[in-house]
Image (cartoon, coloured by chain):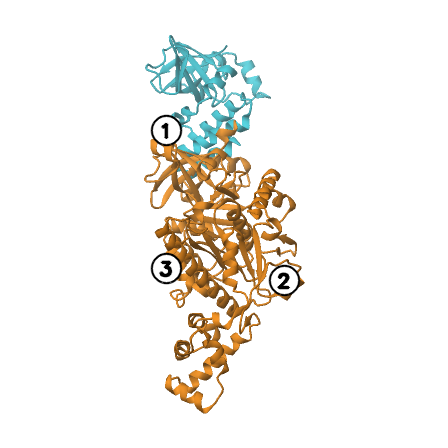
Amino acid sequence: MQRVGEVIEASTTEFVAQCYELYQSPPLGSLVKTADLPVELYGVVYNATTASLEPGRRPIARGKDEATDEEIYRSNPQLLKLLRSEFSVLIVGHKQEDKLFHYLPPKPARIHSFVYLCSPEEVKEFSQSFAFLNLLIGTHLPVPVEELVAACLRQMCQVQEDPHAFLVAAGKELAILLSGELNRLKAILGRIR
Amino acid sequence: MNEESSKRLGIVVSGSLNKGVEVKLDSSASVEDMAVGRYVTIEGEKRRFFGMITDVSLGVIDQKLTLTPPDVADPFVAEVLTGTSTYGTLHVLPMLTIGGEVASLVEGPQPVKTVPSHFSEVNLASQQDVELVFGSEDERKFYVGTPLDMETKICLDLPELVKRSNGIFGKSGTGKTFLTRLLLIGMLQKSAAVNLVFDMHSEYGWEGRSEDRRKVKALKQLFPSKVAVFTLDEESSRRRRVSTDFTVRIGYDEIEPEDIALLRQTLNLTEPAVEAVYQLSRRFGRNWLQNTLDLKDSETNRELLKELSIHESTYQNLQRGLGTIRRLPFLVPHAVDSPVRNILDYLDRGINVVLEFGRYTDITAYILVANLLTRRIHAQYRERTEKTLGEDIAPPHPLVITIEEAHKFLNPEVASQTIFGTIAREMRKYNVTLLVIDQRPSGIDSEVMSQLGTKITCLLDNERDIDSVLAGVSGKSELKSVLSRLESRQQALIFGHAVPMPVVVRTREYGSAQSYADLLPEEAEVKEQAEKDIEELWR
């Protein structure tokens, strides 16, 4: 199981995890999980940031005399320690006693819990129901929800045996959820086909 | 996906008993696969409903979709939107309940008195369902056709059918004649009734032709021992190599004033002229026609007319009209053999009679002969039936009289006068019923139409005709849309007494060698029948 980070901030609906390596956050829309035994929390990565360790000290441009941007990191190895990558995860379900629930867990994640990228089998198992789409669509996020939903479905369809059928089924679910919001539906459909 | 679940169409979403229920189609069921007139079953909570699709429509979940249609050129988008944002709906008219409750288990399908509950599952009716409703072929039921897109047989209960007068309607060329032939054969085989067919175009007796000029066998060729062909026109029959059993000649003395009254329109007679006919017949008795035709323009005759207070012009009008009748070659001053007695003779032996008109296809001859014969036959039947009531003997065979161009006999002006109007109204009291064949049902008196037990109608597209055929049927507007969408051949809507619910059938094949073989009884039965016939001959 691929460990991708550690929880540094948590609430009922989401948590923020820091990556161990700079820029190593999982892709947008991928399914990750963290454990607060006996409950396992599943979430979708909706945002990733890389910023200075200290909020008051912003990075400054350093590449004036360098030929490539890789050179900057090579000549300033401290940078890797002064910057950090974080990603935010929207909780979309949980697993308790080997049963999957596509709704919010009773408690938020614990700080310092490890965050893992879900294996293809887990993704497949989780995506058997589209109930999580409702959670995604209903939230207010700094990123456009349509982008997130589309990214998430694109990620999930890669592990399906019949990606087309999966996307169609998901599309139908969305068409019902977004029955009054034709433009949002169109936006998502345009991004997942 | 197994076969059962693939037949699922959708779920009930709204509706009423009067107007039928709305069914939202599943995304897996395409609107284009639906057809008006098809049967569905609805799985209610407590009972199963049997209904018919009467309309198919399209719906969208959001009106914006109709204003800014999505890019359906993209198959993915199209696939996603079908069945979700855009969907098909069916309008289903529940007709019967089958199974589920005690009454319908014991007595078969029952008429609906309620609607299925919300979100009941709707399936295409299976073969067994249709069989349960329309029964399968047996000694009472005759296979007339199959429902649309199905192989099941739809059967008519013929003994039940002939208890009432029936009608076959449809535009010209929609297959009325073929349907009638089929029904006649069915009656001949499955019911105790005998038929008397007034065959205007000589196509039921020996053989007819299909529209593509193919020869088609008719009754006598298929059932020589059970059918007798009478003809008015011996020459025409001989030319067509038809073996006829009797040539009908009608004596002047058999024509009664009522016959002339009926022909008032076709003979262009005035009211006073018809009155004069009655007066003349009172004066001359049975031979009134001969005597009237013999009247010469003399002083004594003028005296006579004056005495009867018949005006000169009325008399002229009458003479002109009667002249038309006299020119009919099958009318003779004195007929040797009475056609009525002969026909009754055959009918009593259970032999069906087809009367061919040969060349005399003009309506005057048809109305005159059909009326004249039927009136007497009906009178005989009436007498005998009344006798059976008193004397406890077997009633005569039920008789079905087939008439074409029925609106000429049964239009509102003459329906009250002709014997056919009486038969249609009196119905089966005297064991005589009608099989009415017509292409303009709107021309038939509504009182008569309302008395027809079972109506079989091919395509009709005149609004008035459709209205008059469907008058008084429940679910009329729904049936209307079904009726006007029938294919122009080989399809018919049957409703009324002999079927539990209105049904659209693709009529059974008729005209090929195989179809004849299917219609004819098994060889063993034929032998048995032959032996019986021989036995009867020696008795």
Amino acid type, mark 3:
Glu
Residue at horizontal 48 percent and vertical 23 percent from the top: A28
Say which mark, if any, is on residue A138: 1
Looking at the rendered structure, the secondary structure element under dot 3 is helix
Is residue B170 or residue B377 the one in the foreground?
Answer: B377
Say which colour chain A has.
Answer: cyan
Looking at the rendered structure, the secondary structure element under dot 2 is helix
Amino acid type, mark 2:
Ser
Residue at horizontal 49 percent and vertical 77 percent from the top: B290
Residue position marked by numbered label 2 in the rendering: B237
Is circle 2 on the same chain as circle 1?
no
Residue position marked by numbered label 3 in the rendering: B447
Instruction: Single out the residue that lies furthest toward the front.
Output: B539
Amino acid type, mark 1:
Gly
Say which colour chain B has.
Answer: orange
Q: Are marks 2 and 1 in contact (CB under 8 Å)?
A: no
Q: CA distance from mark 2 to mark 1?
A: 86 Å
